[in-house]
Amino acid sequence: MPSTLCSVPLCAERGGHAFPRNEKWKKQWIDAIKRDKWKPTAHSIVCQKHFKESDYLVETHRGTSTLHHRLRKGVIPSIFAWTKSPTLSAVRRESRLTCRKKLIENIEFKEKLALYE
């Protein structure tokens, strides 16, 4: 029997997490996946691709390899085709700019300090 397709628009993955029973959280999930006039059924799911690694509780048994990945309570899907995640080059560029700004501030501080000596 094939598993259910992900309920997120533009996603064709199979299998995933059922919608929460809590009405407040269920509405947050529906809002997050941008399906306003849609009601999830008992078989509607959201696949793992739409959750961050930090959204999961990783369970092991006596220090062995990972046995289960369970969603933390209250998490909302946040990774979608329509959201941009920064590329590696953008992250590196931002890091370089931050380092340069700190270096310039440090140099300016030392120059001002030298005036008082």
Image (tube, rainbow, N blue to C red):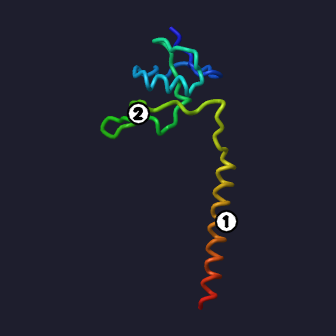
Residue 73 coordinates in the image, percent (x, y): 39, 31
- Residue at mark 2: 72
Residue 97: percent from left, percent from top: 67, 60
Q: In this view, which residue lies farthest toward the top?
A: 1
- Whichever of labels 2 and 1 marks the residue nearer the N terminus, that label is 2
Residue 95 x, y percent position in the rendering: 63, 57
- Vertically, is 107 above or below 26? below
Give the quarter of the figure containing the C terminus: bottom right
Q: Residues within 10 Å of mark 1 (few under 14, many from 20)?
A: few
- Give residue 45's mark: none
Disc 2 marks which amino acid? Arg
Q: Is residue 69 visible?
A: no
Is mark 2 in CB contact (under 8 Å) with mark 1? no
Left or right, 79 with reference to 42: right
106 up-or-down from 58: above or below = below
Where does the image place residue 36, in percent across and percent down from the top left? 58, 20
- Residue 53 drawn above or below residue 111: above
Q: Secondary structure at mark 1?
A: helix
Q: Residue at x 67, y 65 (%)?
A: 100
Find disc 1 in the rendering and name its residue: 100
Q: Nearer the viewer, residue 43 or 26?
A: 26
Q: Can residue 99 be seen in this snapshot?
A: yes
Name the amino acid type tagged 1: Arg
Residue at figure coordinates x 44%, y 35% from the top left: 56
Q: 104 left or right of 33?
A: right
Task: Provide the secondary structure element on which disc 2 rests.
Answer: loop
